[in-house]
Amino acid sequence: MTTQDLIIEQTGAMGLITLNRPGALNALSLDMVRGITQALLQWREDASVAAVAIRGSNKQGPFGHFCAGGDIRFFHEAALAGDPRLEDFFTEEYALNQLIFSYPKPYIAFMDGVVMGGGMGISQGGSLRIVTPTTKMAMPETNIGLFPDVGGGHFLGRCPGSVGEWLGLGGQVIGAGDAVAFGLADVAVAQESVAPIWDALPDWVSEGSAALEQRVRALGIQTPTPHADHVDTINAIYSADTLADIAQRLQADTSEWAQTAWNVFQQRSPLMMHVVLEQVRRARGMSLEDELRMERDMVRHCFHLRPGTASETVEGIRALVIDKDNAPKWNPAAIEDVDMAVVQAFFQSPWPSAVHPLKHWL
């Protein structure tokens, strides 16, 4: 199956998915979510398919960028127009995330270039997550007044120490070495190895999934870990009990690393940073399924707790991609002014459990 934004094919025993929306850095549309889901469900029951691989593309061809996330311009338009497809998008995207995490066949994600937001959601559940020296990985949602969804609480909460809090609150970009060190990738390979690995998958999978993984890992390389080298600092700062305490510790640390993190911290939505801290810490004690249901509640509140232009998410997207002034008017503007009752409201489900959009899984 080939659509404008998605190429789905089978070569030998490999099911192959190419995200083909390079002009938008392969940002996921609802149709793309549905196309990937349809392919995975079909291949799950197809004995002729032994494994699945997914990659992105750039304007020059395959690879280059994996996926920059969900289509946030659509989120903005749909939220202001009351478009019901916004609800469908998050329900179906989160169901796809759970499908990937529970997939019974090897699922190999080629995470080169930009891998952010929704791109993490369609790769983190993979059995083999490949990164390259070009990888730029992040969960940058607090920059648009959102939170790290697509299972973000689950996989960030399982990073070492307080790394999940650091990544979730500030949305900092990390490279291949840090991704492997923090458990967000399995192996880094050279950029020139990516296409040959992809082309060899149909032959390698015939040897069995263990042999396939062994062949890929044999091509692994070492890459820098500039942030993992500061993990003691991350733990010392981001283990603090409250967001205010984290901010105080960041300000007090005069190192270049901490001051860079503090500068990022000051640009994010204060309300959503409070929400994210609560999310990541709750998620550590939750199953993936329960965490995704919680996220579905949270994202509903992002657009409806304060609807229309009053939404932090609508305002954040406006500043980043609509008006492009990069000057969001966060409400409130300071972390100490956030009403904690509003934070807790994000974790109250708007649906009875019997009719929750994610009551059933694919």
Image (tube, rainbow, N blue to C red):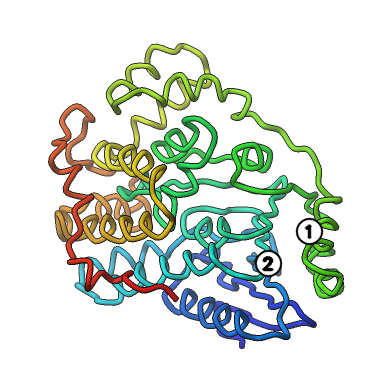
Near-viewer residue (243 or 259): 243
Q: Residues within 10 Å of mark 1 (few under 14, many from 20)?
A: some
Going from N to C along the chain, the mark reached first, 2 or 1, is 2
**x then y, percent, for residue 156:** 48, 43
Q: CA distance from mark 2 to mark 1?
A: 9 Å
Q: What quarter of the picture does the N terminus occupy?
A: bottom right
Left or right placement of residue 223 versus residue 136 in this view? right
Number of numbered discs visible in the structure rendering: 2
Give the SS element for disc 2: loop
Asked if residue 298 shows in the view, the reply is yes
Near-viewer residue (89 or 288): 288
Near-viewer residue (334 or 130): 130
At 30% across and 76% down in the image, what residue appears? 85
Quadrant for residue 330, please give it: top left
In the picture, the disc for residue 213 is 1
Left or right placement of residue 155 versus residue 290 in this view? right
At 36% across and 22% down in the image, what residue appears? 240
Left or right placement of residue 50 versus residue 334 in this view? right
Assess whether mark 1 and mark 2 are in contact (beta carbons under 8 angstroms).
yes
**Amino acid identity at mark 1:** Glu
At 20% across and 58% down in the image, what residue appears? 349
**x then y, percent, for residue 296:** 31, 61
Q: Which residue is mark 2?
A: 106
Quadrant for residue 55, please give it: bottom right
**Amino acid identity at mark 2:** Pro
At 38% across and 42% down in the image, what residue appears? 280
